[in-house]
Image (tube, coloured by chain):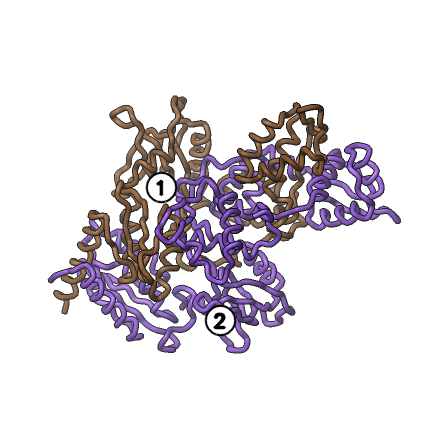
Chain colours: A brown, B purple
Amino acid sequence: MELFSEIYNCYYQVLRHLLCTQTALTKQQIGDQICGEGFEESLLSIIPKLENGSWNLFHQDGDLFFSKLTSSFITPVSTLQKSYLKALLTDPRMQLFLSQEQLENLQQMLSSVTPLWTQEQFYYYDRFIDGDPYENENYRRNFRTLLTAQKNHQYVDIDYNSPNGNRVHHHYVPARLEYSVKNDKFRVLALKNARDHNMKLEILNISRMQSVSLIEKTLSFEVDFNALIQNSYYREPLKLHIINKRNALERAMLHFANYEKNTTKIDENTYECLIYYNQIMETELLIEVMSFGPMLTVIGNDKFLKSLKARLQRQKKLITDNH
Amino acid sequence: MSDFHELIKSFPKTREYVRDFFVYGFKTRNEFKNKSPRTYDNERRRLESWLSPFVHKDHLSNGANISLAIDSNLLDTNPLFRVWKTKSFTDNDIVFHFFILDLLQDGGKMTAEEITDDLLTEYEAFFDIQTVRRKCNAYQKEGLLQKQRKGKTVVYSLDTSLAQWLKSNETILDALAFFQLAGNLGMIGNQLTDQFDYQNQTFRVKHSFFVHTLEDEILLDLLNIIHQQKSAALEIKSSKKGVINTTYCVPLQIFISTRSGRRFLCAYIDRSKRFTCFRLDTIKKVTPLEKTEAYEELQTKLNRNRRQLWGVSFQGRERHHLDKLTMTIQVFEPKESYIVDRLRREGRGGTVTKTAPNIYQYEIEVFDCNEMLPWIRTFIGRILSLECSAKSVERRFYEDLQTMYQMYQIEE
């Protein structure tokens, strides 16, 4: 059971797609497929092998290539993959997706397989304790409705308990379902019609939803979701200076690895790191930066620096007044 | 660079390069110590080829600086999974792969001799019978083929029922689309979604730390050893000095930080009679040894000890058995009651008591309070006092605060 095996190689994947095409292919079409799916230089390796017959997988007729495989070709599931699926069966989140009958079917098909891991082999020592209730039937129903709506670009009517205790009712199109590993919670990144005929992005916790129902209305135009997120980033990123002491550099680089960032060395022991973020991420990023104490120096932007200084000011006053 | 190949034979060397580019993302050619310029150039070219959409180049006075610009908020999969799809192979390997699986697609059973004949007649592919037998056995080991003995003959067959079932169930494909991004060993989920031509267009993961997939091979070995309740020899490279040492231990559990994505092996060291955690990215090689008789006992002991563990350290610098930390904070209720929620949700079993209007006290006893400091600092702006039986921790907290006041010129 090798994770790094040629059977999972990207070239095999590209070739499978080409070989399962039952019509004749031109060299140009083969090249386009390789460029789309392969690595940047794969074209230079694959095309000569097909042309000189080292990979005798096609019949060649003039400029055309005909697959030698039958149309029903399907790659079987390896032992490694079966063990992975068996391990997933013990994950409570699996019930969000599969019905009881499907779970039993899969269990049956994998009855002789050893799971790749068991839940108790992992311990998440800093995970928050109020994770989502995956066993709750209403939660599961809401999750599945949101999933259906997301895939069909369909509007849903959400009855929601807001964090300040108000109950609100709105129509949204779920753009993505976002999972937080730290919070063990699902949230919906939802699009809502704004007044100016644009769509605005809101984030809603699934566990706060009382009910979700599909509406017979779909989004009539494409929304570039990533552009929506990127446009929400502040023009000026957070600029940090990191002094490489107490292993701070490596810790910071790993800690902020989930943000888009750019790091450069500015002198022997100091590094400059730019982190791109938006308003929604701001408070979390601020407390993450504070957690490093004096190992990081915030240079800008002004807004972030002002928030940090305000916290420190308040802290200094509290300690002075208290002693 | 005539000997450049896009694919590679072994993973460990590449793992280091990808990690350096991804984690640090600012090393120029001159800063890769102990590596020849040619090695650096080849590794960089490979990385650029595999991950071209994510490679970011800056031209600096001391050379080009390449890094990986990966924003997990914007991605449907982990781009570093591509690194796992680069294993090199021979011409025979790829030709055999497609023809043998195609030949047995109808569920029929064939001997190695029959397969050899059919490969030639059906596909014009010539293999000698020993090669066919060896390859069939290798595929049987990977679980792609079934092997059955019928009297004196051995027959091979292919079972595609599970693959067909997975392909026809969109709900399981949705689950795989989610777990490839959010779960352990997501690379395998990603192989499956690739295999069934299903792309994640639904899920995103917050707090996703893509770089850690590079340790998945080590993780897989460790899970196997834990399952077999064996002891192991670990080759560990010190992150500070770069020296490799061998440690003998009983692997017990994988500890994961959801805040940094870092993963650790928690193991029992018989020589020192202690539990210790090793970062997975420092483990270079794992060798299984003999079965451990006292395995269950060690697991029970670890579970008991975990209650006093804040992170991954089983002993503080002052070498007390346990240290007590008390933090008093100001919370204006009800506006700021989310702070009290934070103490309860993130406080890992510490007690939270309201001692006066708008004043809360958080108290906990753990092995190493030093590990708590990053979390404690997230309450800066609200802390009335911090006391700790490990005086070095208390001192460091206040000294760091003073340093920060100076750094940001905070006046009275």
Comparing B408 with A196, the one in front is: B408
Comparing B239 with A226, the one in front is: B239
Comparing B269 with A144, the one in front is: B269
Q: Is residue A55 left or right of residue B398?
A: right
What distance separates the C-alpha of mark 2 from that of mark 1? 38 Å
Residue B77 percent coordinates (x, y): 48, 42
Residue A291 drawn above or below residue B152: below
Q: Is residue B174 left or right of residue B343?
A: right
Q: Are marks 2 and 1 on the same chain?
A: no
The amino acid beneath tag 2 is: Phe
Residue A57 percent coordinates (x, y): 70, 34
Badge 1 density bin: few <14, some 14–19, many ≥20, Cα 10 Å = some
Residue found at x 31% / y 29%: A199
Disc 1: which residue: A205
Disc 2: which residue: B275
Q: Is residue B114 left or right of residue B75?
A: right
Residue found at x 37% / y 46%: B58
Residue B4 percent coordinates (x, y): 58, 47
